[in-house]
Image (cartoon, rainbow, N blue to C red):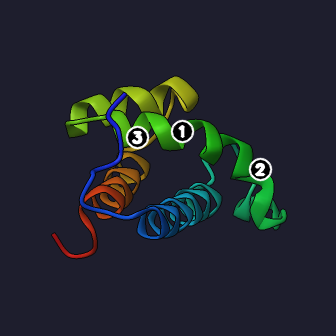
Amino acid sequence: MESWPVRKDSKELKSAYIRGLEAITRILYDLDPDGMGRSIDAPLDEYSDAADELMPRLWAARTESEASKEIRRSFPTAERRLLDALWAARQEMVNGPHR
């Protein structure tokens, strides 16, 4: 697994991690791949365990293909829009916004 870049201090890393985790949780809730989020008006935290599990695997993915494989480990029937949204969140988490 790839380590956090050394150019960031621990406060920045913690902030980036929290933002990334929140983004992944929100994407999973909104796109609701397992039908336990928005589609049934469940609490936002319904996908927090899945986001916790997925976060380090997305971080370590170096390509969109690798990320898709990791996402499909948790959500085998993931649609393209879920894959794209999580890849975009991963890119922002790793590279910062708008890169």
- Please tell me how crowded label 3 is: few (under 14), some (14-19), or many (20+) other residues with Cα within 10 Å: many
Q: Residue at x 35, y 53 (%)?
A: 90
Left or right: residue 45 compared with residue 71: right
Looking at the rendered structure, the kind of residue marked 3 is Leu
Q: Mark 3 points at which residue?
A: 58
Measured as percent of width and height from the top left, residue 26 is found at: 59, 65
Residue 70 percent coordinates (x, y): 42, 29
78 versus 35 height, above or below:
above
User: Which of the two marks, 2 or 1, is nearer to us in this view?
Assistant: 1
Q: Which residue is the site of mark 2?
A: 36
Label 1 amino acid?
Leu
Q: Which residue is drawn at 66% across and 41% down?
A: 50
Say what secondary structure mark 3 lies in.
Answer: helix
Given residues 66 and 85, the one toward you in this image is: 66
Q: Residue furthest left?
A: 99
- CB-based contact (under 8 Å), mark 2 and mark 1: no
Q: Mark 1 points at which residue?
A: 54
Residue under the image location 38 percent in, 64 percent down: 9
What residue is at 43 percent from the left and 43 percent from the top? 79
Above/below status of 27 relative to 73: below
Measured as percent of width and height from the top left, residue 95 is found at: 23, 61
How far from the left and from the top, in percent, is residue 98?
20, 76
CA gap, disc 2 to disc 1? Answer: 17 Å
Q: Is residue 42 left or right of residue 24?
A: right
Mark closest to the chain's N terminus, 3 or 2: 2
Q: How crowded is mark 1: few (under 14 residues within 10 Å), some or many (20 or more)?
A: many
Is 6 placed above or below 98 here?
A: above
